[in-house]
Image: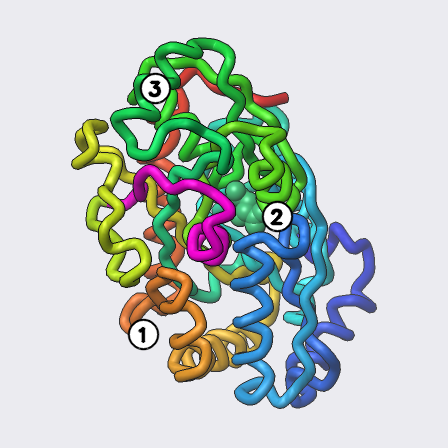
Amino acid sequence: MRFLRYGSALLLAALAAAARAEFPDKPVTLLVPFAAGGPSDKIARDLAEALRKPLGQTVIVDNTAGAGGTIGAARVARAVPDGYTLLVHHIGLATAPALYKKLSYRTLEDFEYLGLVNEAPSTLIGKPTLTANNFAELRQWIADNHGKVNLANAGVGSASHLCGLMLQSALKSNMTPVPYKGTAPAMTDLIGGQVDLMCEQATNATPQIEARKVKVFGVSSPQRMTLPLLAAVPTLSEAGLTGFNVTVWHGLYAPKGTPPAVLARLNAALRVALKDPELIKREEALGLTVVADERLAPAEHRKFVEAEMARWSKIIKDSGETAE
Ligand code: MLT
């Protein structure tokens, strides 16, 4: 029994009392498993803002970065299941089990699923000094520099790492991965020219593309982005990597064993937050799609993650990529 992990009936009584008390009666923490300033952090801060009203409480964001998001995810899996420590995480929660031989949490068993939040395409972006100005020229440059190209990511299992895996296998070209604690620090090095390429979520890439601080070569989703700034950018599939499809999604989670009344309160607050016009405006301005209400049932969320685990474990196995 999970509660016994905390070794005392006292905790059980405290949790039951917490569930009976008007939850939440103190600030709620959204833990982001990547460094501040990256796409996951931006999404969590938007969500915290939109959750304040429906929860009637302060909602704070805390970053615990490292190991492609697995350190932060493990922290929430082990947190007291009282609803006050939640996880905002992306596709990495579904892919880590196929990538890490030793993982200190179980994706399907150690979390309560509170609902999906959004979906974001990734963009293939490059340092501003690259001579290539479109995907065909970039493809040639990668071929001419086989084995010498370095590709930034946020650690094994991060969205940027997964997109990079797909890119290398589609191009049949091995690149040198350069891992960071999140794609915010990676973006700084890309802009500075310390790394060559990155496959980064539009959330973080769009402002840098707009400011012409990086070059954009393609988007990872099956359809082009509708943002005027990026509508002319081809999908990687139409640019020659037929069928290329990496869509990064984010979800909200609580530790397993969180009282049902608290889960229901959190899911209801998420549904209100995702209808917040301000949040929708901010997310769409970055190329994100906020998940529609009918997909917010926790059972739907869990089923979606289970399907993504199956889909990605095959892609990862074929790539031969694993981590310790
Ligand atoms: C971040 O927030 O740093 C990114 O989501 C990391 C990644 O998964 O690429």
Q: Position of residue 295 (x, y in %)?
A: 30, 66
Judging by the rendered image, the residue that carries numbered circle 1 is 293
Distance from disc 2 to disc 3, alpha carbons, whole Å, reads 25 Å
Is residue 214 visible in the rendered structure shown here?
A: yes
Q: Amino acid at mark 3?
A: Ser
Image: 94 above or below 140? below
Image: 205 above or below 16? above
Evaluate if marks 3 and 1 touch, with contact meaning CB atoms under 8 Å apart: no
Q: Where is residue 105, by image quadrant?
A: top right
Q: Position of residue 85 (x, y in %)?
A: 68, 65
Judging by the rendered image, the residue that carries numbered circle 2 is 184
Judging by the rendered image, the residue that carries numbered circle 3 is 169
What residue sits 55% from the left and 55% below the top? 40
What residue sits 52% from the left and 34% below the top? 157
Q: Amino acid at mark 1?
A: Asp
Q: Where is residue 41, by image quadrant?
A: bottom right
Considering the numbered disc 2 on the image, is that residue within a helix, a strand or a loop? helix
Residue extent of the magenta highlight = 205-221
Image: 61 above or below 213? below
Judged left or right of residue 86, residue 263 is: left
